[in-house]
Amino acid sequence: MLSWLKKYHAPVLSAAALLLAGSLAFSGCAGDGGSEETEAKTIIVGTGHAYEPYCYLDKDGNLTGYEYEVLKAVDELLPQYTFEYQTFDFPNVLMALESGKVDIGAHQYEVNEERQKKYLFGTESYTTYTTYLTVSADNQDVHGLDDLQGKRVSVSTGSNSAYLLEKYNEQHADHPIELAYTKSLSDEETYKGLQSGAWVAVIKTKRDAGKLNKEFGNGKDIVKQVGEPLATSRTYFVFRKDEDELQAAVDGAIKQLKESGRLAEISRDVLGDDYTEKE
């Protein structure tokens, strides 16, 4: 044993030399085709805070809802990004996107011509969104849009429903519908507005109207839906025009969630049924 030790004289390297050698070895490996992990890019998502069950704050002030759960699942599939969230009144989400304060707009956005001029929409939808005129259950006068001429209808500022009714008024300038613009009405405010006559109608999906009946009807319907659908739409995430790479990544993740059945599962868990493909 001693004779072997005498024959082998290992050189003693200083700590600095060892560190330098390790650094050179690692850089050599990277040069041979290896790659260092890159830090994930932070993506700011702008969403709402008062549209239950899609995007709202729970009793502790934490963001929750369908939009949030879908985006969490999307983020898990995109290691190159880390999503963070900021909440706004509904009309301000797209303004924040346009000004560069956020990178994704998420608030059950439907496509319309005006929005397409300004923003880049995803190509993979994640919810159906068919809307109807919604009135008090005892209303016998309103059966369609023409019956609302001269009457007041509540619409969210910047919403697709507002856009469609504005287009209607352009074509019926002599007998327009009176539009009552609001920011982010709660279900209770919507219900009380209909009951008090502050407005004759609101625009809702079947599932949103059903929620009003369940919450405030005491076992009876307090609202009903009339006429043909105002819009037969789907919802998409929204991006700035120059964010096609981010758009493509998010679209790819949503497609994966659809194919795996995870998106339908989230819809059932949060919305009560699978509204990813059916009304």
Image: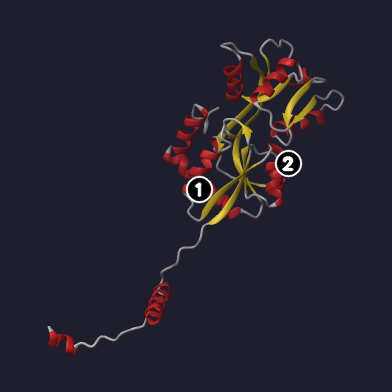
Residue drawn at point x = 87 percent, y = 24 percent: 174
Residue drawn at point x = 68 percent, y = 37 percent: 90
Q: CA distance from mark 2 to mark 1?
A: 29 Å
Place residue 125 in its image quadrant.
top right
Give percent across and percent down for residue 165.
75, 29
Above/below status of 263 relative to 1: above
Residue drawn at point x = 73 percent, y = 41 percent: 114
Dot 2 falls on a residue whose secondary structure is helix
Q: Nearer the viewer, residue 1 or 269?
A: 1
At label 2, the amino acid type is Glu
Asked whether residue 218 appears in the rendered view, the answer is yes
Place residue 265 in its image quadrant.
top left
Q: Nearer the viewer, mark 2 or mark 1?
A: 1
The N terminus lies in which quarter of the figure? Answer: bottom left
Q: Nearer the viewer, residue 45 or 179?
A: 45
Q: Pointer 1: residues within 10 angstroms few (<14), some, or many (20+)?
A: some
Dot placed on the residue nearer the N-terminal end, 2 or 1: 1
Indicate which disc residue 75 carries.
1
Give percent across and percent down for residue 74.
50, 45
- How many numbered dots are placed on residues in this image? 2
According to the picture, the residue beneath numbered tag 2 turns out to be 114
Give percent across and percent down for residue 176.
83, 25
Which residue is at the far bottom? 7
- In this rendering, position of residue 7 left or right of residue 24: left
Dot 1 falls on a residue whose secondary structure is helix
At label 1, the amino acid type is Asp
Above/below status of 18 relative to 147: below
Place residue 141 in its image quadrant.
top right
